[in-house]
Amino acid sequence: MKITFPVFVGLRYIGAKRRSHFLGFISLISLLGMILGVVALIVVLSVMNGFEAELRGRVLSLMPHAQIEFSSKEQRDWQGLADKISEYPGIKGVAPYIGGDAMLALPGMVRGIQLNAVLPTAEEKVSVIEQRMIAGSLSDLKSREYGIVLGALLARHLGLTIGDAVTLVIPKVSVTPAGIFPRSRRFYLVGVFEVGAQMDSTSAFIHIEDGARLFALKGRVQGLRVQTSDLYRVSSIMRPIMQALPDSLQFSDWSESQGSLFQAIKMEKTMIAVLLMTVVAVAAFNIISILTMMVTEKRAAIAVMRTMGASSWSIMGIFMVQGMSIGLLGVVLGGGAGVLLALNIGEVVAAIESLFQVYIFDPNVYFITEIPSVLQWLDVLKILLGALLLSFLATLYPAYSASKISPAEALRYE
């Protein structure tokens, strides 16, 4: 009975006709603010998760999980070292590489690139480039044929098609009787890949033996690329391997080159969540205003209930139920609408683009053509619980003020 009395009276007050229309208007604004805040949080965090997943899938798809850079002593026997590493658990593939900065030159045009000299049969084990080829194949790279595979944007910028020639220049020099000249070689385009990321405009692949001749390594390589079974456990998987290998080898993983990018995305997601939570906080502050005015309006009724034996806790419960009802309704409606919108945001944006004939993500500018969304139920749970907590905290002060009303003072002027 002690529990049902505050609940019954609190719910009755919600539907009761109020003297002030302004109070009803503020209640509606508070409810809409709670709904809008919850919807915005769910949708925005889902879109942030989608962008992070897209970035991870595109950027890391061509990037090895780990790299082992050789010193001069180990450069010649890379095959034996690769076989040894492949025996460890958690290793899916090992491939040699030679790489560095270079330039592609055409008459009247020069473009800087990231050059990768690879062994095609081994590269397929550590990269998805073969799956992203839109013309030709990685296996078309053959020793001494000087073929090159370029990203789609890079090939388009240079105006190259399959079979066209381009001059590859590396930042090393050759000393000849005629003087000092940069090392260069004419290569022929044999393939084009597209991953939908910046690599499409900066990366090029050649055969590892052609790279060794170009960099004057005489059959040696610069290091090994390693693919593990779990992208997020690279350090733990590679730790026993590095402990067993010579100290002269230098180890690095994807988190060192791209970790700051994903940390920035994580921080941005957190800051956006905090900023959008202020919308929910404003709705919660409106609940304080509503309950404070309601306490003033119901002073006589509170005094009557107190004289009939209602305790201070019961009076507090009445107004806490009333305030929490607004918060709970806003959370339920906002949560449902937010989940539906997050799951269908791509279709909604496509409909808006079709209706107004505009492109939110122009495919000629961006690497994606639609807004990605990944709904994580843990995020939804945190948002709903956070909104309910703010609603609960907003009811405490007005409810406490109501419980301290003196019946004699309240009824004096009635």
Image (cartoon, rainbow, N blue to C red):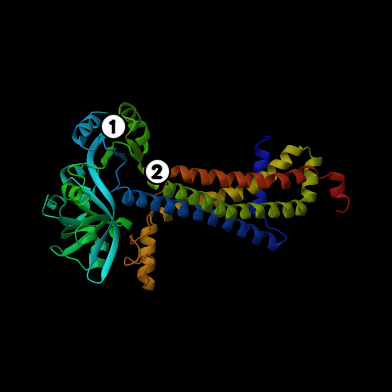
Give the residue type at disc 1: Gly
Left or right relative to 308: residue 196: left
Residue 90 numbered mark, or none = 1
Q: Residue at x 19, y 32 (%)?
A: 80
Please say if 165 is above or below 331: below
Residue 362 numbered mark, or none = none
Identify the secondary structure beneath mark 2: helix
Q: Residue at x 29, y 43 (%)?
A: 64
- What count of labels does the image hold? 2
Q: Name, please, the residue furthest toward the front.
A: 177
Q: CA distance from mark 2 to mark 1?
A: 20 Å
Please say if 295 is above or below 306: below
Q: Name, please, the residue furthest toward the right.
A: 412
Left or right relative to 228: residue 147: left
Callout 1: 10 Å neighbours few (<14), some, many (20+)? Answer: some
Whole-percent x and y of residue 142?
Answer: 12, 50
Give the residue type at disc 2: Glu
The front one of 201 and 89 is: 201
Q: What is the quadrant of the N terminus in the image?
A: top right
Question: Quick check: marks 2 and 1 in contact, CB under 8 Å?
Answer: no
Q: Which is closer to the viewer, label 2 or label 1?
A: 2
Q: Residue at x 24, y 50 (%)?
A: 116
Whole-percent x and y of residue 72?
Answer: 27, 38
* Mark sitting earlier along the chain (2/1): 1
Whole-percent x and y of residue 117?
Answer: 22, 49
User: In the figure, residue 350 lies in which quadrant?
Assistant: bottom left
- Residue placed under numbered mark 2 in the picture: 256
The front one of 203 and 175 is: 175
Whole-percent x and y of residue 263?
Answer: 45, 47
The front one of 346 and 257 is: 257
Identify the secondary structure beneath mark 1: loop
